[in-house]
Amino acid sequence: MGIGPLQLIRQATPAQRRTLLAAALGWALDAFDAMLYALVLALLMKDFGMSKGTAGLLGTLTLLASGVGGVLFGFIADRVGRKQALMASILTYSICSFASGLATDIAMLAAARFVLGLGMGGEWNTGAALVAETWPTELRAKAIAIVQSSWAIGFAAAALVAGPVARYFGWRAVFFIGILPALLTLWMQRSVPESMMWEEQRREKAARIGEGTNNRSDETNPAVGFSALFSPAFAKPTMTLLFFNFFSLFAWWGLFTWIPPYLSLPVGQGGRGFGVVGTTTLLVILNLVGMLPGYASFGWIADQVGRRNAFLLYSLMAAVLIPLYAAARSSALLMIIGALVAFFGTGLFSGSGIIGSELFPTSLRATALGFTYNGARAMSSVAPLVIGTIGEMRGLGAAFYLCAAGYLLAALMATRLPETRGKELQ
């Protein structure tokens, strides 16, 4: 499979390493802040008297906002630069994580989680665009996969922090810790370069405007850039990637929003009855043994067998494994099967940034990534609510079968995606 992650980083330029680090840290801290909610969900349900349906609805609001944020920050990134949009998204989700800890009722918590979702949605596409435009064609897939794998690190860090902090200081303190990612922007402003590909295109646009060959209003109208996604050249790949992401994300958020409470809730309430230590241990293993190598491996697999075949492999394996996870009872089986579900069920998302970057030109890339990924995340926002509602009626284990169906439908959409392996960015 060629070079490994360490060799990849060694042969990169200093600028490439800094963009990779910025995007990876931003995505890891995005995961850290986003997953704090799931990790203290059982405590929130108790303190606010929330049902599973209401708890799922708050998760749905965050995902809905992420779709809006993805499109919004994608447009900003295509107009003012990848780095500035990335920094703005990080500040948004950090501040709103802190604000979640100040909530005194469900309405205040819902408002904070909604605005947090805007920043959460904007981080992914701006970071992916920055890395895709900085790294060469032969290393692009591997670099984006490394960025994507940092989600698992952020999730694992959240699991390690949330359990002890919530136990000794309460769930509010857990959310207060979520302000820490804001410090990352201080380093980014000083050390991370802007995409040279984006800057070159901006200079070319300025030259065309100066010569009177371009309409300035088109450059600042979000409808113009957004409508290009549905032009004859891009409509089919746009919609295919959108629905692949939708089915995958429905399955992922439906499953992983509810795995923490599934593990910690009493057996009588449809959970598995593990304590704080047991739940934290299972979640950390799920992330570091499952998600992390799953994300990172996708770039290497996609370079070997192609983007489309890699999507098929990962989505089909996830669909097969989820029913086995729902049927597991012992901690050993939950750990082993859970790690495998996380490997395949989350690893495929590395491919969304890879193929999305290769399908669309620089002038449209961040907007396209924002729409196809975060638009899908908004569409999938019903997943926590749906799985929570079904879990209320039939148990969470039974509800997870719907997540398996989501991965099967994602595999079907993958067969309609074009192959982009080896494509030069435009």
Image: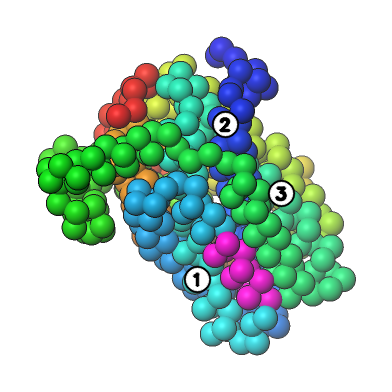
For disc 3, the marked residue is: 156
Tell me how far mark 2 sits from mark 1, CA to CA.
32 Å
Queried whether the magenta region covers residue 323, the answer comes back as no
In the image, what residue occupies the spot 62% across and 46% down? 190
SS assignment at label 1: helix
Quick one: 178 or 264, which is closer to the camera?
Answer: 178
Would you name the residue on which mark 1 appears?
115
Tell me the distance, in whole angstroms, between the alpha carbons under discs 3 and 2. 28 Å
Please tell me how crowded label 1 is: few (under 14), some (14-19), or many (20+) other residues with Cα within 10 Å. many
* Mark closest to the chain's N terminus, 3 or 1: 1
Q: Amino acid at mark 3?
A: Ala
Q: Is residue 17 above or below residue 80?
A: above
Q: Which residues are magenta?
A: 91-101
Tell which of 417 and 154 is nearer to you. Answer: 154
The N terminus, quarter of image: top right
The amino acid at mark 1 is Val
Residue type pointed to by label 2? Ala
Q: Is residue 416 above or below residue 242?
A: above
Q: Residue 189 location, x and y as percent?
A: 59, 50
Lower position in the chain sequence, tag 3 or tag 2: 2
As helix, strand or loop, the secondary structure at mark 2 comes to helix
Give the residue at mark 2.
15
Where, quadrant-wise, is the C terminus in this rendering?
Answer: top left
Q: Nearer the viewer, mark 3 or mark 2?
A: 2
Q: Is residue 95 magenta?
A: yes
Disc 2 vs disc 1: Cβ atoms closer than 8 Å?
no
Element assignment for label 3:
helix
